[in-house]
Image: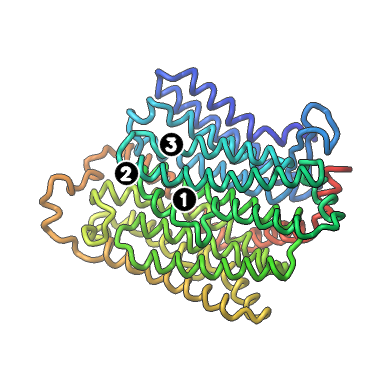
């Protein structure tokens, strides 16, 4: 197999974005191009994932320059899994947008920006060069800022300012740490850095650099204490855009943490303890924040923060089982977090509100949608045997075996709060009778029932598609545990990555 194919997930979305830009005055052409681009990207990414799952890690050297001198792209199981999940979410979001995003927003570059955003995410997952990871991160930040402000409404602008300010702070830490790395090693290739950092005698400067990376990527991942930008901004854009943010954007920071602290900075006791403390505080603050909210999108935003703690806990414990559980949860989380914001968008069309006090009667009026929503809500909660359940068992078990009882309490507390809140949403938004006064208000009347059947199908189809994948993850857990097992093995044996890149 020609290794040049590993950059196709990046190139396909770049070409799609350019073609959409050239078709600026025709929204219908942009829709067709977006579906074709997303489908092609998904097919290629799944094919590449199959290749690396059954074979060796693939690498490509830009311009024919041998590593560590050229620009390196690396496709291992971890990176291609995330590329595939990104492409699945992107396809579902694009299809959903046909019925949810106004033509006004589409005319001002919605599809162009989405594909540049997906291009940036895929580039960040596939790069083998630390500076190019920074470049891809900046592409993601710029594209996401434009998406968040698309439409120009006041809440969007306020949320976007908070979002971009904290992410620029994270980028400052990231770029400074890169500068220190280059100064002490003379290299930017991650495989080469892994070897050179291990030989540096001054461990103090190495540890400080590691902490700077942790702060930078921690902000992007929304860990405690610099998480507040996320719940202050993710509820402001339309549900289609919020689904992109909730499902994908924090995960690129999580990926970078896993890559950095398995390849460049081997985990020591200090870093493990620090990560576990941060994981505990992230779970507790996210859960408490979600508990106090009655707006369901704000609640979901805090639950994103809460569940980031699961990933940091798995990385902090750094056992094979803990890493495997964290990766499995990452698979589940990308799909379900994307879907829950799409589901919230349909609920808004039905009741014109995200406030639990103003919702109700959805089960009575829309029983089939309610069944879909029930499965989505309780997959997020981890009700067995749904997808959110399996990885938690491994995380609980590892916390017990390592005698991390504070971490175990935080994991249990976060899980209980999530289950309680999903039950609360089900009881108040779906099962209870909606107060009659809201049905009489013009701006609270049901707009969903006025849609034609094809528009309803456009909205429900992507939600059902992601739900099927989520159910597959839960009921076909063996396959996803096998993938997670291989990724955990590769993370704990960085020499596999180094040998693949440096030959």
Q: Nearer the viewer, mark 2 or mark 3?
A: 2
Residue 478, percent from left and from top: 65, 63
Sequence-wise, which precedes: disc 1 or disc 2? 2
Residue 400, percent from left and from top: 63, 80
Q: Is residue 384 above or below residue 462?
A: below
Residue 288 placement: quadrant: bottom left
Q: Secondary structure at mark 1?
A: helix
Label pair 3/1, CB-CB below 8 angstroms: no
Q: Is residue 420 above or below residue 61?
A: below
| Residue sitting at x 80%, y 33% | 70
How far apart in space, not on screen, are marks 1 and 2 (Cα)? 17 Å
Residue 120, percent from left and from top: 59, 37
How far apart in space, not on screen, are marks 2 and 3 (Cα)? 13 Å
- Please indicate whether residue 382 sits to the left or right of residue 451 in the image: right
Q: Quadrant of the C terminus?
A: top right
Q: Which residue is mark 2?
A: 155
| Residue sitting at x 50%, y 76% | 412
Q: Secondary structure at mark 3?
A: helix
Label pair 1/2, CB-CB below 8 angstroms: no
Q: From this viewpoint, which residue is outermost toward the right?
A: 503
| Residue sitting at x 65%, y 75% | 398
Circle 1 packing at 10 Å, graded few (<14), some (14-19), many (20+), is: many
Q: Which residue is mark 3?
A: 147
Sequence-wise, which precedes: disc 3 or disc 1? 3
Residue 172 placement: quadrant: top right
- Residue 90 vs residue 314, the one in the foreground: 314
- Please indicate whether residue 436 sits to the left or right of residue 187 in the image: left
């Amino acid at each position: 197999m020609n290794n040049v194919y590993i950059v196709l997930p990046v190139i396909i979305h770049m070409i799609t974005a350019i073609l959409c830009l050239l078709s600026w005055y025709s929204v219908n052409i942009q829709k067709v191009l977006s579906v074709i681009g997303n489908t092609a990207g998904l097919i290629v990414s799944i094919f590449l994932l199959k290749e690396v799952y059954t074979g060796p890690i693939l690498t490509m050297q830009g311009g024919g320059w041998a590593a560590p001198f050229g620009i390196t792209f690396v496709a291992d199981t971890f990176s291609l899994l995330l590329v595939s999940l990104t492409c699945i979410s992107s396809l579902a979001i694009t299809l959903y947008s046909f019925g949810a995003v106004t033509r006004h927003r589409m005319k001002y570059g919605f599809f162009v920006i989405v594909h540049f955003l997906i291009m940036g995410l895929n580039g960040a997952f596939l790069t083998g060069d630390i500076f190019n990871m920074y470049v891809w991160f900046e592409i993601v930040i710029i594209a996401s800022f434009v998406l968040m402000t698309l439409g120009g409404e006041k809440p969007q602008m306020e949320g976007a300012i908070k979002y971009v300010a904290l992410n620029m702070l994270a980028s400052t830490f990231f770029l400074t740490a890169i500068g220190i790395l280059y100064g002490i090693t003379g290299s930017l290739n991650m495989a080469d850095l892994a070897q050179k950092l291990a030989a540096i005698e001054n461990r103090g400067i190495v540890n400080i650099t590691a902490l700077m990376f942790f702060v930078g990527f921690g902000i992007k991942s929304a860990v405690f204490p610099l998480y507040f930008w996320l719940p202050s901004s993710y509820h402001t854009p339309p549900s289609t855009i919020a689904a992109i943010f909730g499902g994908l954007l924090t995960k690129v920071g999580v990926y970078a943490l896993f890559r950095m602290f398995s390849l460049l900075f081997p985990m020591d006791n200090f870093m493990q303890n620090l990560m576990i403390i941060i994981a505990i505080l992230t779970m507790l603050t996210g859960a408490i924040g979600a508990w106090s909210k009655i707006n369901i999108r704000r609640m979901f935003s805090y639950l994103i923060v809460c569940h980031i703690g699961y990933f940091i806990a798995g990385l902090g414990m750094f056992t094979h089982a803990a890493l495997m559980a964290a990766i499995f949860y990452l698979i589940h989380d990308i799909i379900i977090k994307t879907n829950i914001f799409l589901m919230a968008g349909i609920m808004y069309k039905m009741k014109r509100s995200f406030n639990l006090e103003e919702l109700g009667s959805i089960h009575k009026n829309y029983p089939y949608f309610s069944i879909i929503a029930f499965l989505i809500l309780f997959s997020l909660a981890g009700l067995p045997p749904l997808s959110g359940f399996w990885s938690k068992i491994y995380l609980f078990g590892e916390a017990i075996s390592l005698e991390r009882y504070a971490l175990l309490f935080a994991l249990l507390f976060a899980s209980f709060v999530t289950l309680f809140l999903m039950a609360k949403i089900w009881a108040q938004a779906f099962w209870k009778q909606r107060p009659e006064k809201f049905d009489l208000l013009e701006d609270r009347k049901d707009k969903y029932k006025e849609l034609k059947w094809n528009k309803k199908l456009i909205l429900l189809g992507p939600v059902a598609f992601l739900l099927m994948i989520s159910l597959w993850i839960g009921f076909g857990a063996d396959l996803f545990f096998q993938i997670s097992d291989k990724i955990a093995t590769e993370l704990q044996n960085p020499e596999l990555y180094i040998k693949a890149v440096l030959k």
